[in-house]
Image (tube, helix red, strand yellow):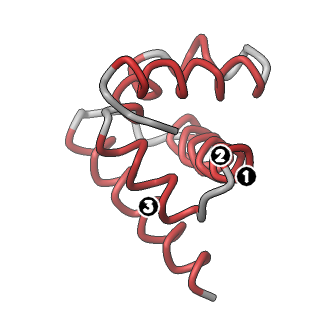
Amino acid sequence: MGNLKIMITFATQLYDKLIMNNVNMSSQVSDKIEYFILLVSEFASRSKVSEAQAYRYLNYYGAFALCDKHYNIMHTLSLDENIQTLQSYCQRKGGSL
């Protein structure tokens, strides 16, 4: 139940950010939200942390802004490539996962 609540909170925050950035309210928004949730979940699994910790870590180091900016490219790449990219990006910003 805790993970579901965290993911709903994350999805709500992401939705609000997309609205603030004037993203067209279409299936693309839904696709982005689903993809970002997948990235958080997979990042958590591979980093051996909870989804909440992964969300906070990625948010703190600005990984969601990167994902939002490059979504059109990222969603065409493999999940492995994107997780590695997020890890490298956060590490360059000072992260330790």
Relative to 9, say whether 33 is above or below. Answer: above
Residue at 42% across, 24% down: 91
Q: Is residue 12 left or right of residue 45?
A: left
The residue at which mark 1 appears reads as: 45
Residue 76 in which image quadrant: top right
Circle nearer the viewer, 1 or 3? 1
Q: Position of residue 87 (x, y in %)?
A: 54, 27
The foreground one among 33 and 83 is 83
Residue 47 disc label: 2
How far is disc 3 from disc 2 in space, using C-alphas?
A: 19 Å
Give the mark, 1 or 3, whose residue is nearer the N terminus. Answer: 3
Would you say the residues marked 2 and 1 are in contact, meaning their CB atoms lie under 8 Å apart? yes
Residue density around tag 1, few if under 14, some if 14–19, many if 20 or more, within 10 Å: few
Q: Residue furthest bottom?
A: 1
Residue at 63% across, 88% down: 1
Q: Is residue 53 left or right of residue 74?
A: left
The residue at which mark 3 appears reads as: 10
Relative to 76, say whether 31 is above or below. Answer: below
Q: Secondary structure at mark 1?
A: helix
Residue 79 disc label: none
Q: Secondary structure at mark 3?
A: helix
Q: Amino acid at mark 3?
A: Phe
Q: Amino acid at mark 1?
A: Ser
Q: Position of residue 54 (x, y in %)?
A: 51, 53
How far is disc 2 from disc 1 in space, using C-alphas?
A: 6 Å
